[in-house]
Image (cartoon, grey):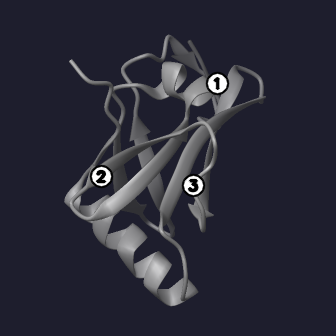
Amino acid sequence: MKTMISLTDKACNHIFDYIKQRGKGIGIRIGVKTTGCSGFAYVVEPVDEIGEYDQVFNNKGIDVYVDTKSLIYISGSVIDYKRKGLNQGLEFNNPNIKGECGCGESFNI
């Protein structure tokens, strides 16, 4: 089974609108960085050119780029776009997470 990163329809629409408003870009890059009280945090940024170690996953016309080091931590994730009161943003459903910090900003594997 191929490793996947999936986007919901809401996430695809949000990312498409973001790239359109930005005026350039070929997709988004999703990764992880070491930080926070639990160990890792997600990083999301626009992509203007493919990186040397990027894996590409196409979701309903949106290209998602993930470097091979981050892929082991987020493989199988489903990314959604949520609005909760005044807060809005991408929400990760990552099957690899063993625990999260109390504020929800970082996680561990």
Q: Residue at x 51, y 59 (%)?
A: 28
Give percent across and percent down for residue 29.
55, 51
Nearer the camera: disc 3 or disc 1: 3
In the picture of the structure, the residue carrying the numbered disc 3 is 50
* Neighbourhood count class around disc 3 (C-alpha, 10 Å): few under 14, some 14–19, many 20 upward: some
Q: Amino acid at mark 3?
A: Ile
- What percent of the width, then of the height, locates residue 86? 51, 70
For the point 42% across and 51% down, the residue is: 64
Name the quadrant of the C terminus: top right
Specify the label residue 5 is tagged with: none
Left or right of residue 66: residue 101: right
Q: Position of residue 89 (x, y in %)?
A: 48, 60
Compared with residue 37, is residue 62 higher up or lower down, i.e. above or below? below
Residue at which label 2 appears:
58
Q: Where is residue 96 drawn, in percent x and y? A: 43, 16
Q: Are marks 2 and 3 in contact (CB under 8 Å)?
A: no
State the quadrant of the N terminus.
top left
Q: Earlier in the sequence, mark 2 or mark 3?
A: 3
Query: Which residue is identified by label 1?
Result: 101
Q: Residue at x 44, y 66 (%)?
A: 85
Which residue is found at the position 21% from the left and 60% from the top? 60
Label 2 Cα neighbours within 10 Å, binned few <14 / some 14-19 / many ≥20: some
